[in-house]
Image (cartoon, rainbow, N blue to C red):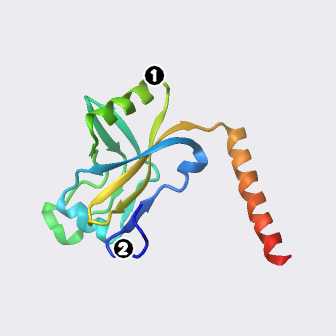
Amino acid sequence: MATKSDPNYKIIAENRRARFDYFIESDLEVGIVLTGSEVKSLRTGQSNIAESYASVENGELWLINSYIAAYKQAGVFGHEERRHRKLLVSRKELARLWQAVGREGMTLVPLVMYFNDRGMVKLKIGVAKGKKVADKRETAAKRDWNRQKQRLLKQG
């Protein structure tokens, strides 16, 4: 990740539920193919990746069900808000992701969409395994205990 002092680095959208709903095994930074009106809309911060996922289809990686708001100034040259967007990865990484999804039963979950230090839109996807209800309860209990611990240390 880039440092906070970098003027171009900016988080656009974050999937906060992903770490609660999934065990993230590994993550990968990928590029995304966008139109001009989509980039303009992202600059205003109008997007959501919470309900989206990535999928390997026909030898290509796609981001499905991500939302980028329509850019009003684009008029008729705008974009479809929930279209499938192509993700850019190397063939070696694509083969690894395809194997993880196909054989190991993993899911490709978008974690964060951001502008990198060069001003390019990047997406961090995680190779994840779904959590069961008991695992989610355990995660919530750990989070609550850490909050309580910090509170006690702050007082004492």
Where 82 sits versus 39, above or below?
above
Amino acid type, callout 1:
Arg
- Choose between 141 and 133: the one closer to the eye: 141
- The residue that appears at 36% across and 69% down in the rendered structure is 9
Please name which of the two marks, 1 or 2, marks the residue nearer to the observer.
2
Image point (30%, 33%), residue name: 92
**How many angstroms separate mark 1 from mark 2 (CA)?**
40 Å
Q: Are marks 1 and 2 in contact (CB under 8 Å)?
A: no
Residue projecting furthest to the top = 103
Image quadrant containing the N terminus? bottom left
Q: Quadrant of residue 146?
A: bottom right
Query: Under tag 2, what secondary structure?
Result: loop
The circle on residue 18 is none
Query: Which residue is disc 2 drawn over?
Result: 6
Residue 99 point in image, percent of width and height = 40, 26
Which amino acid does the dot numbered 2 rest on? Asp
Earlier in the chain: of badge 1 and badge 2, it is 2
Number of the label disc, if any, that sits on residue 103? 1
Q: Quadrant of residue 69?
A: bottom left
Res. 135 image quadrant: top right
Rendered-image quadrant of the C terminus: bottom right
Q: Name the foreground residue: 70 vs 48.
A: 48
Q: Residues within 10 Å of mark 2 (few under 14, many from 20)?
A: few
In the image as oriented, which residue stretches furthest toward the right? 156
Kindly state the secondary structure of the residue where label 1 is placed: loop
Q: Residue 103 in the image: x percent, y percent?
A: 45, 22
Looking at the image, is 107 positioned above or below residue 71? above
In percent of width and height, residue 125 lies at 42, 46
Residue at (18, 62) in percent of width and height: 36
Residue 50 position within the rendered picture, expressed as x and y whole percent measured from the top left: 46, 53
